[in-house]
Image (cartoon, rainbow, N blue to C red):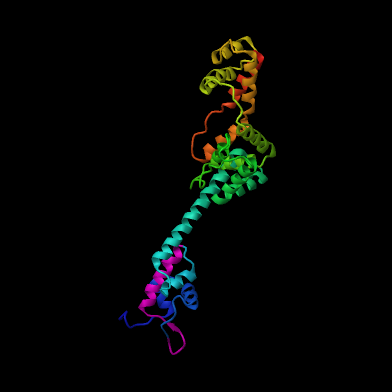
Amino acid sequence: MDDRTDLFTIGQLATRTGLSVRTIRFWSDSGVVPPTDRSHGGYRLYDTEAVARLDLVRTLRELGVDLDTVTRVLREQVTLADVARTHVRAIDAEIRTLRLRRAVLTSVARRGSTTEEMRLMNKMARLSAVERQRVIDEFVDETFADLAPDAPGAHIGKAMRALPADLPDEPSAAQVDAWVELAELVADADFRARVREMAVTGAQGEQLVASPDPTRVIEHAGTAVAAGVAPESAQGKEILDRIVSADLPADQREALADQIDRFTDRRVERYWQLMAILNGQEPFPLAAPSMEWFAAALRAHA
């Protein structure tokens, strides 16, 4: 038998290629592998080029290429390299989707979420990078409206826009949780009002009271918080005296406490923590509880 001249029936072609007769007939009807000729009885006949075409079609289909694109490749309307590049991007997108689903389901299993929580989590996590950034931009634009870009405190708005371009290819359950919590936080009217209050106060450029080194406050006040020391107690005064001078006048203590209260908020600090998680950074320890203790101690011992 000379493969260059002999023709094959669909049955013979199926035996030669390992494909089913039904598949070959379908691809033939679709125009992907048209018959070379027909027998006197009207049966389709195929040459050896059809064998090669069928092998290519099978390979492309197994790689997920749709039949229309396969046809365009065979007709040389598009190159195989172009098709490969397109499908690499499609596969990458599918992989990201699957990893995201896994992260959401892992988070749901860990949290014991309700159906509604799972729906919200999946919806928020699947937002595109542009859509996620829009959520944050709308929050910042509303909160910092009418503040001059160069005003003191306006830099907070710029920093608050600093979302990562995209969730990682393999977002952790913690990152999925962080994004959902962040979206809920910036939608909260009380939170927006609090950030606005802090921004406006900072933008007014009022004279701030000299404050001790924050690391010293966190070191000593943080120890007091962890040990459950009451700010108004005698032990609380001893700890306070390690942070500020015992001779600090009462009016300055009150002013410093007021200043701490204006610029300390656990939810705002949580915002920065969530940003850190989304950017793949280790969440930093909260300073707000230490600052709150410090302000209470200042008032108690004024």
Q: Is residue 74 magenta?
A: no
Residue in the picture at 62% in, 9% down: 234
Residue 16, horizontal then vertical, whole percent: 38, 73
Q: Is residue 158 visible?
A: yes
Q: Can you say which quadrant of the picture contains the N terminus?
A: bottom left
Q: Looking at the rendering, which quadrant does residue 187 occupy?
A: top right
- 94 lies above or below 164: below
Residue in the picture at 51% in, 22% down: 215
Q: Observer-nearest residue: 112 or 228?
A: 228
Is residue 246 found left or right of 80 in the rendered image?
right
Is residue 275 found left or right of 24 in the rendered image?
right
Q: Looking at the rendering, which quadrant does residue 243 occupy?
A: top right
Is residue 17 found left or right of 110 in the rendered image?
left
- 24 lies above or below 210: below
Residue 248, horizontal then vertical, whole percent: 59, 13
Residue in the picture at 46% in, 65% down: 65
Q: Is residue 41 magenta?
A: yes
Count the marks: how many? Answer: 0
Magenta residues, as a range? 38-63
Q: Can you say which quadrant of the picture contains the C terminus?
A: top right
Residue 10, horizontal then vertical, whole percent: 44, 78
Residue in the picture at 64% in, 42% down: 146
Q: Is residue 18 visible?
A: no
Q: Looking at the rendering, which quadrant does residue 13 occupy?
A: bottom left
